[in-house]
Image (cartoon, grey):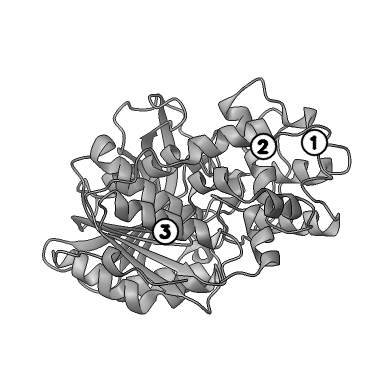
Amino acid sequence: MLNATSRWFSLLAIAIATTVATSPIFAESPSTPGDAGMPAFYTWTEKVPSTPGQMLRTEPLTPDQSLAEAAQNIRILYTSTDGIDNHTPIVVSGALFLPKGAPPQGGWPLMAWAHGTVGSADICAPSFTRRSERDSRYLNYWLARGYAVVATDYQGLGAPGLHPYGLTRPLAYGVLDSIRAVTQGHFDIATRVVVFGQSQGGRAAFATAVYAQAYAPELDIVGVVATGTPYAAVHEHADDVELANARKSVVPTFAYDMLRLSTAALLDPSFVPTDYVNERAMPAFELSQHACLHAIEQKIVADGLTFDTSFKRSPQRALNAINREAAYPTLKSSMPIFVGTGGRDLDVFVPGQAALVDNACKAGDRIEWRVYPELDHSATVNGSLPDSTRFVARAFAGEHIDGNCDSLPKL
C-alpha cells in the first residue's frame, strides 16, 4: 500500500502516465508550438486520403532509433482519424520492427506497442528520438521471441498538429490505424494482434480494447497487455485533503499538468493557457511547448513549482474537461486484458488502477490482474514479463482466457 505522502504525489498524475525521454531541446515556431525540428518525412504535403490505416510511406530508421533485436527497423507514416473531432483525416507517424530470421507460415505475429508520456513536442516522438533503455529492453525482449512490433507515435507527435495529451480516443485511433497500416500486405505480418502499452500507453491499450469494435471491427485483436494504467474516473472521487496536499508539493509529476494545458486549448479554443500561468511558472510552461518530459520535470523541480504557486487563476475547470475526455467511453470489451500494477507506483494512482480492474470485472470483462508489491511504475514494465509472456502466448494460441476477476489479488 502507498503511504499518505506517496499518495499525495501520485494524485497529480491521476489518469496520466510517464516515460522519461532525453531528447534535445529545439526552438519552435511561436505560431505552431511543438511542430519544428522534424525531418520532411513526417509532413505529408498532399491531400490526406480519407481511408484510415493507409500506409503513406516508409524509410529505414537510423541506428540510434533502431532496436538491436530487429532485422528491419522502419519508420512509417500512415493515415488516421482526428480523435478530437472524430472525422478529419490526419497523418500519424510511428515505427515497425521486424524480428530476425525467417517468418513463420502466415507471417510474424504482431504486437502493437503504445508508449508512455514523452512530452507533446514533435521531437519527443519515439520514432524520432532514442527510446529509453527500459523500453528498448522491453521491446527487444518481444522481438527476440519472434513477434513483430508496430509502435505508433500518437496523433500530433512527430507528424504536424498539437498532441492531444492523454485523451482516450486519439490514443486508441493511433494504435488501431497503425495495425491496419502494417497488416495490409506491405510486410510479412500475420493478422492476429496483441496490443500492449505502459502508463499513458496503458491507457491507450485499454482504450484500444474498448474502441476496437466500433472503429476497427475487422481487426483480429486477441488480447491486451497494460501496465501502470490510468483511470480518469477515479479523479472525481479523490480525497480532497490528499489532493490539497499534493498541490502544495514540488513534484516532477506536475509536468503532466503543464502538458495538459495545451490539450485544454485543443478542446476549448477560448482557453488561453498564458492567461492562467503566472510569471514564475511561465518558463516551465514555455519549455513544455518545445521540450520533452525529462527537461520539463527538471525545470519544475529546479524552480520549486507547485500547482498552488503556478497560476494567476485556477485552470481546474479546463483540467476537469480533459479528465472527462480522458475517461473510457465504456469498460466493456470482448478480448482478454492483462493488467499489471506495481504496488509502489507513484506516477499513476494505485487505488485508481484497482478501481479500473474492479469496474471492468463488473462490466463483464475478462481481466487477468497481477500486482507486484515491490515494484514501482517503471519497474513493472519488465517485472511483469513472466506473467505477460504466458498471457500473450495463450492469446496468440487462441486459448480462452477467463482472467481472475473471481479471485482478485489484494493490495
Crowd band around label 2 with a 10 angstrom C-alpha radius: few (<14), some (14–19), many (20+) = many
Residue at image mark 1:
277
30 and 389: which is toward the camera: 389
Residue 319 seen anywhere in this rendered image of the structure = yes
Percent position of residue 71, x then y: 34, 69
The residue at the far top in this view is 270
Whichever of labels 1 and 2 marks the residue nearer the N terminus, that label is 2
Where is residue 273, by image quadrant?
Answer: top right
The residue at the far left in this view is 105
Q: Are marks 1 and 2 in contact (CB under 8 Å)?
A: yes
Crowd band around label 1 with a 10 angstrom C-alpha radius: few (<14), some (14–19), many (20+) = many
Percent position of residue 61, x then y: 46, 58
405 and 143: which is toward the camera: 405
Q: Is residue 55 above or below residue 83?
A: below
Residue at image mark 2:
261
Q: What is the C-alpha distance between the residues marked 2 and 3?
A: 24 Å
Number of numbered discs on residues: 3
Residue at image mark 3:
197
Q: Is residue 332 left or right of residue 3?
A: left
Amino acid type, mark 2: Leu
Whichever of labels 3 and 1 marks the residue nearer the N terminus, that label is 3
Crowd band around label 3 with a 10 angstrom C-alpha radius: few (<14), some (14–19), many (20+) = many
Question: In the structure shown, which secondary structural element does the residue marked by tag 2 occupy?
Answer: helix
